[in-house]
Image: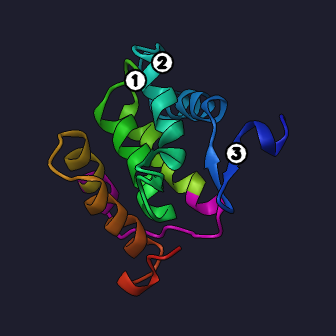
């Protein structure tokens, strides 16, 4: 198994998924549920890994860990970097990244499916997805500085 540094990189004290890790998560998602293994747009997948470090006017574009993770997940689910398994890969990546940072999502029943499908359809934005992640980790609005 490759070292941790090949799966995550550090930015402002938190860990975020690398391209190598997203590609492996995608393969895992396909093994578990089937689907076609092919990359449509590697630039989309790379872009997802860079959400944590994006900035606007010298400030982070996404201010908290949860919003950065949500931005990564939205990019993966909505922008179809893979031929198949985009939503499954997005969920695996978001949960793994949160767990790497000490947050353990425990969503109720089908809420993950609802949130990720609506996100992929463009009906939920980064903030909406971020709020869902925050709640699934048992945190509240005041805890979003994480």
**Of residues 65 and 137, the one drawn nearer to the viewer in this rendering:** 65
Residue at 30%, 49% in the rendered image? 116
**Of residues 111 and 53, the one drawn nearer to the viewer in this rendering:** 53
Position of 48 compared to 97: left or right? left
What residue would you read off at disc 1?
Answer: 81
Residue 25 % position (x, y): 58, 35
- Pointers 1 and 2 in contact (C-beta within 8 Å): yes
First in residue order: circle 1 vs circle 2: 2
Residue 101 among magenta residues: yes
- Pointers 3 and 1 in contact (C-beta within 8 Å): no
Position of 2 compared to 83: left or right? right
Rendering quarter of residue 141: bottom left
Residue 46 % position (x, y): 51, 28
Color encoding of the figure: rainbow
Residue at 49%, 67% in the rendered image? 105
Q: Secondary structure at mark 3?
A: strand
What residue would you read off at disc 3?
Answer: 9
Residue at 41%, 71% in the rendered image? 134
Q: Which residues are magenta?
A: 98-114
Position of 71 compared to 3: left or right? left
Residue 40 % position (x, y): 40, 14
Q: For mark 2, does the 10 Å Cα neighbourhood hold few (<14), some (14 to 19), or many (20 or more) residues?
A: some
């Amino acid at each position: 198994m490759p070292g941790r540094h090949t799966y995550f990189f550090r930015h402002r004290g938190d860990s975020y998924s690398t391209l190598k890790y997203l590609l492996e998560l995608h393969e895992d998602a396909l093994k578990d549920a089937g689907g076609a293994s092919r990359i449509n747009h590697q630039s989309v997948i790379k872009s997802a890994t860079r959400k944590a470090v994006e900035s606007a006017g010298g400030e982070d574009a996404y201010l908290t860990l949860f919003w950065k993770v949500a931005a990564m997940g939205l990019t993966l689910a909505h922008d179809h970097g893979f031929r198949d398994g985009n939503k499954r890969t997005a969920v695996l990546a978001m949960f793994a990244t949160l767990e790497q940072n000490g947050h353990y999502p425990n969503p109720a029943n089908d809420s993950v499916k609802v949130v990720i499908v609506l996100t992929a359809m463009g009906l939920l934005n980064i903030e909406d997805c971020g709020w869902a992640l925050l709640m699934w980790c048992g945190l509240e609005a005041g805890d979003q500085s994480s």
